[in-house]
């Protein structure tokens, strides 16, 4: 199909729809499995270690492949990598649903994470490739809505499936529902997603040394975080020093690749783009607090108050509604308002979390409908953070590097998520133990730590706003002179 008079692919919105459905499916699997863990424990006789790996193994492999997959998409064609990721994710979902023993389910979840990590950078890359100007902001707004809704609605959908189909088979259908969605996405991708402007750069070899160095660096930072509760003792934290060393080696190798004229895995000159560097930092900090909210609230509702999986999912639905609505709105105005929009979004998140803490402190053992408004406010704020931050972060990145840049951004978000859940989860369980099972008290303590993390993200956003204004002032002065 020929481009329109402005050189744009007329199928771009349909292509985006396909990409967003696949991204929604992959991101929802981060949280949907949480409400199924009791059923999996009973059905497969899984132990605590198995359950931990069913959850954390997905996050681990997801984070490991983001950057190499983004780089391959840039160099070899985003459609090819997108389809490969969806195919792997779908096949491993079926394997997970059929798993006869915990080991098979853990292995399938690891492969699911790889599939999700392969397809996700292609989504942001396609937005960069297909859209320009205000349209790009709207497209990223829809992506932000997808991220927010998929994270929050996972427990609701999982709880509904288990409620309808029962505990014995319901958890299997949490994975089986991905089969028709995956097949449809693959078929429509071949119809609506063009191979891409960068699909013919096959002369570039993948930087395998860079892949290995970055893989070890990411693995050694994620492993102690995702295994924080199952790995006793402080020895695991020595891996963070190992990770820092490998990140330094990776940076040195990538600079060497660039000097010699070879294609690096990550062009570190990306970090000379101030909007990109600021966005990566804000994303890492925000996701360290944002995703931990659902973790501790779900534990409070199910373990502390005895809510069913479905009722717990319904309780956090206002966050999803607020996030989806605000993300779409934020995407349409971010090109006009810039980073201040992200800062105000973070202020709303802080307000929503603070109000949630107040409700839990006053009515912790019978919150009823009182959590609705605070979670709605936090969701609106989150919608004004995620998609606008992504839009601004990649706004000055060359389209040819969009997948790699997205992979780095999402890797930071995965590390932030793992670190936040490890820190706040540890605080939460410590407070439960010290208070002899007072889950309301533990939630309040966890929410206050979350407030600190989001406040640090706000500081980073404000610093970027001030720096951007200072960069514009000399230009304005020269223009007036």
Image (cartoon, rainbow, N blue to C red):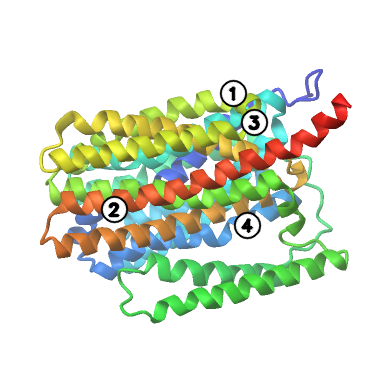
Residue at position x 34%, y 35% from top? 352
C-alpha distance separating marks 1 and 2? 33 Å
Which numbered mark, 4 or 1, is in the foreground of this view? 1
User: Quarter of the image holding residue 377?
Assistant: top left
Point out the residue furthest to the front here.
481
Image location of residue 444, percent across then percent down: 24, 49
Instruction: Say which residue label 1 marks.
Output: 333
Instruction: Classify the position of the C terminus by image quarter.
Output: top right
Residue at position x 31%, y 30% from top? 318
- Number of marks in the image? 4
Point out the tag, 2 or 4, that comes first from the N-terminus: 4
Image location of residue 24, percent across then percent down: 46, 39
Q: Sort mark 4 into few (<14), some (14-19) or many (20+) by Cα contacts within 10 Å.
A: many
Which numbered mark, 3 or 4, is in the foreground of this view? 4
Residue at position x 60%, y 45% from top? 279
C-alpha distance separating marks 1 and 3? 27 Å
Point out the tag, 1 or 3, that comes first from the N-terminus: 3
Note whether residue 160 is visible. yes
User: Quarter of the image holding residue 331?
Assistant: top right
Contact (CB < 8 A) between labels 1 and 2? no
For residue 192, the mark is: 3
C-alpha distance separating marks 4 and 1? 29 Å
Instruction: Say which residue label 2 marks.
Output: 446
C-alpha distance separating marks 3 and 4? 25 Å
Point out the tag, 4 or 1, that comes first from the N-terminus: 4
Determine the secondary structure under disc 1. helix
Contact (CB < 8 A) between labels 4 and 1? no
User: Quarter of the image holding residue 250?
Assistant: bottom right
Q: Is residue 164 left or right of residue 326?
A: left
Note whether residue 171 is visible. no
Point out the tag, 2 or 3, that comes first from the N-terminus: 3
Instruction: Say which residue label 4 marks.
Output: 67
């Amino acid at each position: 199909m020929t481009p329109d008079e402005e050189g744009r692919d007329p199928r771009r919105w349909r292509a985006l729809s396909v990409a967003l459905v696949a991204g929604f499916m992959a991101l929802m699997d981060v949280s949907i499995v949480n409400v199924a863990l009791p059923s999996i424990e009973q059905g497969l006789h899984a132990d605590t270690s198995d359950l931990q790996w069913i959850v954390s193994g997905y996050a681990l492999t997801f984070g490991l492949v983001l950057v190499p997959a983004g780089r391959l998409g840039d160099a070899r064609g985003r459609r090819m990598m997108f389809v490969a990721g969806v195919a792997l994710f779908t096949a491993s979902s079926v394997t997970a649903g059929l798993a006869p023993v915990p080991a098979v389910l853990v292995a399938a979840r690891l492969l699911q994470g790889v599939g999700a990590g392969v397809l996700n950078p292609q989504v942001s890359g396609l937005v960069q490739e297909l859209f320009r100007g205000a349209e790009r902001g709207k497209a990223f707004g829809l992506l932000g809505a997808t991220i927010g809704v998929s994270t929050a609605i996972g427990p609701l959908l999982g709880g509904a499936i288990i409620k309808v189909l029962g505990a014995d088979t319901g958890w299997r259908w949490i994975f089986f529902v991905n089969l028709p969605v995956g097949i449809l996405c693959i078929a429509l991708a071949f119809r609506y997603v063009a191979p891409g402007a960068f699909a013919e750069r096959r002369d570039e070899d993948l930087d395998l040394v860079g892949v290995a160095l970055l893989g070890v660096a990411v693995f050694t930072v994620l492993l102690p975080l995702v295994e924080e509760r199952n790995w006793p003792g402080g020895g695991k934290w020595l891996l963070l020093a190992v990770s820092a060393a490998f990140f330094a080696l990776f940076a040195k190798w990538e600079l060497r690749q660039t000097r010699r004229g070879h294609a690096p895995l990550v062009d570190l000159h990306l970090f000379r783009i101030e909007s990109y560097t600021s966005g990566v930092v804000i994303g890492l900090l925000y996701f360290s607090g944002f995703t931990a909210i659902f973790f501790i609230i779900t534990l409070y509702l199910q373990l502390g108050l005895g809510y069913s999986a479905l009722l717990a999912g319904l309780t956090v639905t206002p966050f999803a509604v607020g996030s989806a609505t605000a993300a779409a709105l934020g995407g349409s105005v971010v090109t006009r308002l810039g980073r201040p929009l992200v800062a105000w979004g973070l202020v709303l998140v802080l307000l929503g979390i603070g109000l949630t803490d107040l409700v839990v402190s006053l009515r912790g053992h019978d919150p009823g409908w009182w959590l609705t408004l605070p979670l709605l406010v936090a969701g609106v704020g989150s919608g004004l953070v995620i998609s606008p931050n992504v839009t601004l972060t990649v706004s000055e990145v060359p389209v040819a590097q969009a997948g790699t840049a997205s992979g780095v951004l999402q890797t930071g978000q995965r590390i932030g998520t793992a670190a936040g859940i490890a820190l706040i989860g540890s605080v939460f369980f410590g407070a439960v133990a010290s208070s002899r099972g007072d889950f309301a008290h533990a939630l309040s303590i966890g929410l206050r730590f979350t407030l600190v993390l989001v406040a640090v993200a706000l500081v980073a956003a404000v610093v970027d706003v001030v720096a951007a204004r200072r960069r514009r002032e000399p230009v304005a002065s020269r223009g007036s002179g």
